[in-house]
């Protein structure tokens, strides 16, 4: 029997949700996002869970949304009206992570790109291995990281967030830590030990106090995440329903450059 693309492990009041498709960069799509959402809901409802950990198999956290899946969805839906149906499962996951009354930790190793960053940034605590990298390359394909922006702006300044999106650069984990995107930066071979230390502290803490900390801090900062996500979903839906953007993504998958890509040549 084929192994599931997302695994769930429960041990000592900790639920670990593991993206299990490293061959595809642990990319997320409408097949595995509902399973992630289901596991999150089960963990939140369970008296046997007090902390949730999200991680990727084989040293890759998540390379973002699965463009190939998007293309296949578009071929089955000839009018290309797929934006909202494609983005809703992702919205369900990131909002559930963010609103979870139980602490959610992102254990980050390897690449964290595009939608993968949204999943990590929605978590309460991000522990990153020193060799991990972060990037938002959406502008290269004619779209923007609409869902990632609200969570990015929760952690870093407006100007730094715009820099990451406009530059489309991939940055090293130490740079992400200096920006404030990452909470704990650790040597690759120490990440499990550091995660264990956090789990011990959280399990020693009052579950009610932890839940209240999340709810109270959101009230103090008037953090209306649902309204921000409504804006993000509309924006992404519009972008994905644009045939030009879809063609650009298809061309990228086939190794072609977008029509607007030009070379820069210095005369100096």
Image (spheres, grey):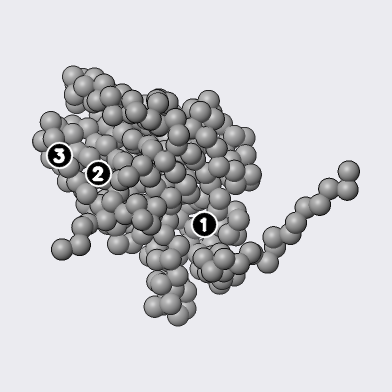
**Which residue in the protein does label 1 denote?**
235
Q: Kindly check if marks 3 and 1 are in contact, taking CB atoms under 8 A apart as contact.
A: no
Left or right of 175, for residue 151: left
Residue 207, by quadrant, is: top left
The alpha-carbon separation of the residues under discs 3 and 1 comes to: 37 Å
Asked which secondary structure carries label 1, the reply is: helix
Q: Give coordinates of residue 249: x percent, y percent.
A: 54, 65
> Which residue is drawn at the image coordinates 37% and 37% (left, top)?
108
> Which residue is drawn at the image coordinates 58% and 41% (left, top)?
164
Residue situated in front as seen by the camera: 112 or 143: 112
Left or right of 50, for residue 264: right
The alpha-carbon separation of the residues under discs 2 and 3 comes to: 9 Å
The alpha-carbon separation of the residues under discs 2 and 1 comes to: 29 Å
Whether residue 161 is visible here, answered yes or no, is yes
- Mark 3 against mark 1, which lies toward the viewer? 3
> Which residue is drawn at the image coordinates 69% and 60% (left, top)?
261
Q: Give coordinates of residue 240: x percent, y percent.
A: 50, 64
Which residue reaches farthest front?
189
Residue 204, by quadrant, is: top left
- The numbered mark, 2 or 1, whose residue comes first in the sequence reads 2
- The numbered mark, 2 or 3, whose residue comes first in the sequence reads 3
Which residue reaches farthest left?
47
Residue situated in front as seen by the camera: 231 or 127: 127
Q: Give coordinates of residue 69: x percent, y percent.
A: 40, 66
Count of marks, rendered view? 3
**Which residue in the protein does label 3 denote?**
10
**Which residue in the protein does label 2 denote?**
17
Whether residue 88 is visible here, answered yes or no, is no
Please state, as top left, top right, bottom left or bottom right, where the C terminus lies in the image: top right
Q: Is residue 89 above or below residue 163?
A: below
- The numbered mark, 3 or 1, whose residue comes first in the sequence reads 3
- Mark 2 against mark 1, which lies toward the viewer? 2
């Amino acid at each position: 029997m084929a192994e599931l693309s997302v695994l769930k492990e429960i041990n000592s009041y900790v639920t670990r949700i593991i993206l299990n498709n490293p061959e595809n960069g642990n990319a997320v799509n409408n097949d595995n996002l509902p399973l992630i959402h289901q596991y999150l809901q089960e963990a939140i409802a369970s008296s046997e869970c007090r902390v949730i950990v999200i991680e990727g198999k084989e040293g890759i956290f998540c390379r973002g949304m699965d463009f190939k899946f998007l293309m296949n969805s578009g071929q089955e839906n000839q009018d290309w009206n797929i934006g909202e149906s494609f983005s809703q499962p992702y919205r369900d996951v990131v909002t559930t992570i963010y609103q979870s009354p139980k602490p959610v930790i992102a254990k980050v190793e390897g690449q964290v790109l595009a939608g993968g960053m949204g999943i990590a940034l929605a978590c309460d605590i991000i522990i990153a291995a020193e060799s991990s990298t972060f990037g938002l390359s959406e502008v290269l394909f004619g779209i923007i990281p609409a869902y990632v922006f609200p969570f990015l702006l929760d952690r870093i300044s407006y100007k730094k967030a715009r820099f990451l999106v406009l530059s489309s650069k991939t940055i090293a984990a130490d740079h992400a830590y200096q920006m404030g995107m990452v909470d704990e930066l650790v040597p690759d071979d120490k990440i499990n030990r550091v995660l264990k230390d956090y789990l011990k502290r959280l399990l020693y803490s009052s579950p009610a106090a932890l839940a209240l900390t999340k709810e109270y801090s959101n009230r103090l900062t008037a953090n209306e995440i649902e309204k921000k996500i409504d804006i993000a979903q509309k924006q992404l839906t519009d972008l994905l329903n644009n045939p030009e953007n879809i063609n650009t993504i298809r061309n990228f998958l086939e190794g072609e450059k977008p029509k607007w890509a030009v070379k820069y040549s210095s005369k100096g």
